[in-house]
Image (tube, rainbow, N blue to C red):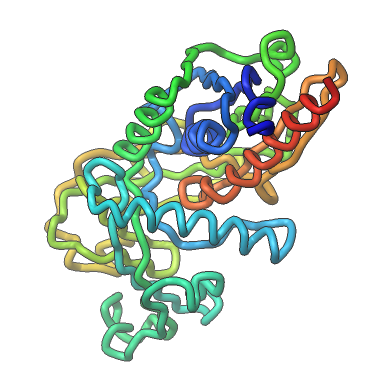
Amino acid sequence: TGSQAVMVGAKVCVVGAGVVGLTTAVKTQQQVPGVEVTLISEKFSPDLTSNVAAGIFLWGPKSPDAATDLDWFQNSWTWFTDLLSKARPWETGVSKLPVYLFSSHSQDQVERKMMEGKVPVYRDCTSAELSLAQPAGKFKFGKYIHTVQIDTKPYLEYLMKQFLSAGGKVLKSTVDALDNLADEYQVVVNCAGLGARWICQDKSVLPLRGQVLRVSAPWVKTAMYADDVYVIPGQKWVTVGGTRQYNDWMTEVSPHDSARIWSRAIEAFPNLAAAEIIEEVVGQRPHRFMPRVELEHMSGGLAVVHNYGHCGYGVLSSPGTSQQAVQIVKTVIMERKSRM
């Protein structure tokens, strides 16, 4: 077709090889015919914030408006349920996961309203279920939801494999400024996460430090949240968390944090006491008041599509925000070709 012909030879660069960057790169290949995509990153899996994520799909990112929120949700949920239907969790990273959300404070703390009516199960907890978290009687509000969990290591490998098999190029390099890419590419997609603080001088991006324990507890088959304690089973270990330390740049493990996480976790869920701690890991969530997904024309004429600032929702919302980013990329390339 004519429109396919005009895409040929367009060069797009995606900066950042985390879950947002990889998803954007793969979707660009899928939806922009004839495009050449290069992925540039300083770090790759398994050395990413994405690798620390427990990967549970519980909707909650901030969004500019209700319509965008719905779009992001539907595109993300469809993407992961499609991967779920392949029934190859060891390959895609995606499997089914039931979750209990408990709160001692209020009902709105356990609600994930966007998921209601769209996921297979979304209901209030029974009184018996409320006492699954200890001490009995403390947690007065609860929800039971069937969702999905994404093991990020196999998932990132799955995406990378797709990207390379579709002809994607990978460059291990540090990008100091987006302008530096103007000679080589027509469009740059900025998926630098916390790196956006330097790469495009967005000082509203700050780390929200998360430390978690990974434990061996194969008897845990359900995710459970009790106020700020969470237990999320993945394919290889159970993630126990966590911390949310704003503007905390420490990437080392804090023994104090570990002790606090563990004591609170076994108080709420005594059946964890027999678990063996495998490792302790730290990730810097790229906190921003909301994810930034928009087009910016740099002074030199370079078109930059931003897709960063997902905080703790990067894994689950990456297909949604990346879909929006790719639509912008497509529009920019079409417009440039039509002017030529």
For the point 53% across and 51% down, the residue is: 317
Question: Residue 150 appears at what percent x and percent y?
Answer: 35, 49
Question: Residue 171 appears at what percent x and percent y?
Answer: 49, 13
For the point 61% across and 40% down, the residue is: 247
Q: How many marks?
A: 0
Residue 18 visible in the picture: yes
Horizontal side of 17 relative to 126 (left or right) equals right
As drawn, 142 above or below 22: below
Question: Residue 117 appears at what percent x and percent y?
Answer: 48, 78
In this view, the residue in front, 168 or 178, is 168
For the point 58% across and 39% down, the residue is: 207
As drawn, 174 above or below 160: above
Quadrant of residue 102 in the image?
bottom left
Residue 198 visible in the picture: no
Question: Residue 84 appears at what percent x and percent y?
Answer: 32, 55
In this view, the residue in front, 329 or 123, is 329
Quadrant of residue 217 in the image?
bottom left
Q: Residue furthest front?
A: 1
Q: Residue furthest bottom?
A: 127
Horizontal side of 36 relative to 302 (left or right) equals left
For the point 59% across and 33% down, the residue is: 32
Q: Residue furthest top?
A: 183
In this view, the residue in front, 39 or 286, is 39
Quarter of the image containing the C terminus? top right
Quarter of the image containing the N terminus? top right
Horizontal side of 189 relative to 203 (left or right) equals left
